[in-house]
Every structure is written in C-alpha cells, then in structure tokens.
Amino acid sequence: MSDKAVLAYSGGLDTSVAIKWLKEKYNLEVITLTVDIGNVADLEAIRQKALDLGAIKALVIDAKEPFINSFVFPALQADALYEGQYPLATALGRPLIAQLLVDTAKREGATIVAHGCTGKGNDQVRFDVSVAALAPELRVVAPAREWNMTREQTLAYAQSHNIPVPITVSSPYSIDENLWGRSIECGVLEDPWNEPPKDVFAWTKSLEETPNQPDYVLIVFNKGIPVSLNKERLGGVTLVQRIHELACEHGVGRIDHIENRLVGIKSREVYEAPAATVLLQAHQALEDMVLTKEQLRFKAKVAGEYADLVYNGLWFSGLRQDLAAYVESSQRYVTGVVKVKLYKGKCQIVGRKSLYSLYDFSLATYDKGDVFDQSASPGFIHIWGLPVRTQAKVQPAKPPE
Ligand code: ARG
C-alpha cells in the first residue's frame, strides 16, 4: 500500500501539477486540503479539480474564524508590521494552514504533508518550521522546491499530463490573498523602478476613481480587539470584511515594499491591505491614549520583534508565545472608540475616546481650568538638567580647538 500525503491545494497550476508529480515520483496517495481564509473563488470547483487530477480525497476547510481570531487579531494587538510596512497577511496565514495540514494528516493516517512553495521564498520556511513544531514525526515534501522546473517546463508538464491550465496563469503576477491582505509580486514589478500598473490592484480603487466625499468610521475596541463598526456589534470576520469594503472604496491600503526575505534576498512586493491599514492605525491611536509613554516605547520594541518572528516562520516558537502573553497583558485597558476618516487613499485618525484615557484635559489645556502647577517646573528642570550642567563644566559642548 502506498503512503498518504496531505497537500495544501490552492487549485492553481503548481499545486495541480504537484498532485500528479507526488504520485508519479513517490507513488503517494494524495489527499488535497484547501483552506479558505478569505477570497477563495469557487471552492467546489477546486475540490472537483483535485479529484479529477487523481486525488483520493479533496477536503475544504473554512478557517476564516480561526484565522481572524487566533492569528490576525493577536497580531493586530501586537501592532505587527514587518519592517514598518507589511501587515503580514500571507505570513499569518501559513502557520494556520500548516496546523490544519497536520490535523488532517493525523486524522487521515498520512505520514507526509506537502505544499507548493519554491525554495526561494519565506513561505516554505513558515510551512516547514510550523509542521516541525507541531508534528516533528511528519515528513514535509515541497514538490516545486524539488522539481526545479521553469514556468515553461511546468506548463509543458501540465499539458502532457492533461492538467487544465487555469486562466489565472495568464496573469503575469504571483498572488496570494486572504482576509488580511493581498500580496502581489513578479512580472514587471521585478524592476523596482516600474510603477505598479493598474492591473496589479484588484481590491482598492485608484485615487482617480475614489469618491470626492470622505467616509467616517467609528471602530470600538475591547481590550485591543475590534468589536463594533459604526455602532453595530460585529463578529471579527464580518467586521474585517466591512472595513475592507469601505477602505477599498477610498483606495486605502496600497503598499509598495522592498523587503528583506529570510533567505537573504531583497524582493519587491506590492500589497493591498485595506482592512489591516485601517485597523492597525486605529488600534495604535487608542493605545496612544491609554498606555503610558514607557508602555508605548517598550511595546513598539516588542512589535518589531513580534513582526520579525511571524515573518520568519516562528509563529509556534516559545518566544512568539511569550511575547503574545505580554501583548495580551498590555491590552487590558485598550478599550474605547476611534473615529477614522477615509478619503483619497488616506486613513486619518480624527478622534478617539476611552474610559481609561490618560489624556487629562485639566493638565493639557492652555485655557481656563488649567491645574498644572507651573511653579514646580523650575525645580524639576534644575534636577533634570544637573548631569548636563555637570558635564558642560568639564566637557564644553563646543570642544576646545
Ligand atoms: N512577501 C510576502 C511574505 O513573505 C508575501 C509572499 C507571497 N507572495 C506572493 N505574491 N505569492 O509574506
């Protein structure tokens, strides 16, 4: 009897070729697993295609809820942005897909899990390391990393094996999308001087097409989790989808990033991350109001570290879990409402309110009602400036010639 492999299957060219290749090369029985974390077109057609190509079973899992609640929202609470720009949509999806591959392999008695990543990117690392963390006894096979075929060779293989080539192959880009964002690379984008052409963007309107009237959005956070939009209480998935629609309409969330991959390559990736852009900004605006200066400074360092861990495939590492515990603790008073204005590609924070606000009007105001004791300032400054005066006496700010 041949061994079984569970293959993460998108329905695209590479993973379709992989079904045949795993059978031909390793004589494996292939079970496909298609995970819906948003924006998968026709799940039933994908399932049928897998079976037509010889998969012994084709499974589909709707994982939108766990994706948002267990991966995206913790990253939002952490303010995770890789290199200050990329909200990590693809990077957050991978560990969840790996987890579902592992669960499925165990249930189906498979000894192998497989994915369609090449050997040049970050995604192979995320899959392999996540599987290793969850089920070190499973073997990971990455056909596209092993077969080393060019695009043309893959197409030729598909033709000779009666694999229907999806029309999307005519797209010159490599695209990955889920509820948190859309990642686009390859084609003309490989020249970093080229402005992304119109057809790169599938979600967000170009500035020329956006309305001439702004939209105002009220987002309520409870302990750092968004729970209501424009006074309507919504579950995580629906809330993200609604913000997505509003932000797309105003052209918000286009990102053009020269990023540093884990494997040492600089690559140019264009992102559409409308919901992520709005929610990350709104969340930080609320934190600015309820966290102290010291908490904010420290949390920003954690955010950078957290984003690196997610990007580098270390979601299931001990350190990511430790940082997540800190982040969770930091959110205990991040409750309140943020007013956001969406207009001409911009997301502006125009108001914020919280029961736990540390902003004290009577301290901040220059008008009547001021309770700040200005007479205490000279004494404070005397001591604050003491080391500078001591140093200036022996080490003048302008050194002698
Ligand atoms: N550069 C992003 C990351 O490493 C996205 C990778 C997938 N991109 C794609 N266009 N298929 O997370």
Image (cartoon, helix red, strand yellow):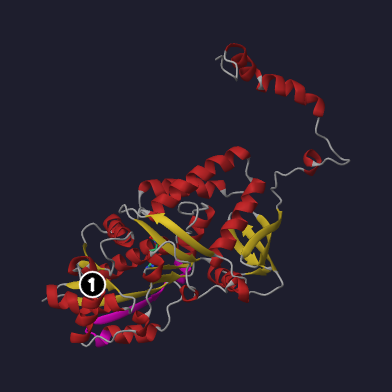
* In magenta stretch: residue 133: no
Task: Confirm if mark 1 falls within 8 A of ligand 1.
Answer: no
Residue at 60% from the left image edge and 20% from the top image edge: 397
Give the magenta part as a residue range. Answer: 51-67
* In magenta stretch: residue 65: yes
Question: Where does the image place residue 88, in percent across and percent down from the top left?
Answer: 45, 59
Which residue is outermost to the right? Answer: 368
Between 341 and 221, the one lying in front of the other is 341
The quadrant of the image that shows the C terminus is top right
Question: Where does the image place residue 48, in percent across and percent down from the top left?
Answer: 31, 87
In this picture, is 305 found above or below 113? above
Residue at 29% from the left image edge and 66% from the top image edge: 117
Residue at 24% from the left image edge and 77% from the top image edge: 152
Between 392 and 121, the one lying in front of the other is 392
Q: Quadrant of residue 222?
A: bottom right
The quadrant of the image that shows the N terminus is bottom left
- Local secondary structure at mark 1: loop
Q: Which residue is mark 1?
A: 150
What type is the residue that disc 1 sits on?
Thr
Residue 105 visible in image = yes
For the image, the number of numbered tags is 1
Between 119 and 354, the one lying in front of the other is 119
Residue 315 visible in image = no
Q: Quadrant of ligand 1?
A: bottom left
Question: Where does the image place residue 289, in percent across and percent down from the top left?
Answer: 67, 48
Between 328 and 383, the one lying in front of the other is 383
